[in-house]
Image (cartoon, rainbow, N blue to C red):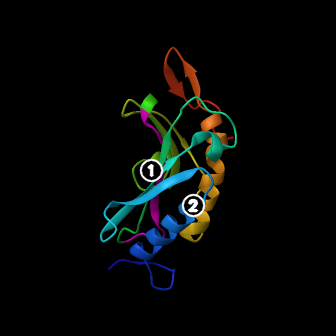
Amino acid sequence: MIFLAGRDRYTQRTLLRDVHDRLTNQPGCEEVRYRPSRRRPRYVIADVDPTTFLGDSHDAATARLEIRFWYPAGVDHEYYRINWVEPERNLMLGFHQDADHPDLGPCHIQLNHEDTPVDRHSATFLDAHPLAVLDDRLQQFPAAVEAIRWENGAPSLPTWPV
């Protein structure tokens, strides 16, 4: 059992249950589920109606959110990946707080196309309860998705931060 530091015995399983409940009540989120299973959750995934979720019309008919929080040893804050995925366009836009790109600081926004990173920028480090972080990031997705630019069939994120 993993306890998240500074969260008063808040376990990863409890956090993912709360994330699941939060997405179940989020407009536009449908079919919220755990991966790999409810008994051994590592991620929460939700199918999304982009127009409802973003509050505006959108080019993709479907999308999904993939959310993972974890707490690595020796670090005093949670790591997370909160990803917006558009399978039809093979596009992923995510807020990642981890150690993968130290040159960008503890948190970054990443855009992948066809499973390859095409753009990364520093993002604000949020030292808050994971559910507050989730709420902040969910509120940032409409502007972040809107900031994606397409040129010759390739996306970029030239205007981040927005």
Q: Is residue 142 above or below residue 6?
A: above
Q: Is residue 105 within the magenta segment?
A: no
Residue at the far bottom in the pictured view:
8
Give me the disc on residue 102.
1
At mark 2, the secondary structure is helix
- Quarter of the figure that contains the N terminus: bottom left
Which segment did they paint magenta? 74-87
- Horizontal arrangement in the rendering, residue 52 relative to residue 82 (left or right): right
**Residue at point 46%, 59% (across, down):** 80
Q: Quadrant of residue 157?
A: top right
**Residue at point 64%, 45% (across, down):** 52
- Horizontal arrangement in the rendering, residue 13 relative to residue 53 (left or right): left
Q: Is residue 75 within the magenta segment?
A: yes
Give me the disc on residue 134.
2
Q: Residues within 10 Å of mark 2 (few under 14, many from 20)?
A: many
**Residue at point 43%, 47% (across, down):** 101
Q: Is residue 68 above or below residue 18?
A: above
**Residue at point 51%, 14% (across, down):** 152
Is residue 123 among the parts visible in the rendering? yes
Of tags 1 and 2, the one toward the viewer is 2
- Quarter of the figure that contains the C terminus: top right
Give whichever of discs 1 and 2 has the lower sequence position.
1
The image position of residue 62, as x and y in percent, is: 50, 38
Residue situated in front as seen by the camera: 39 or 73: 39
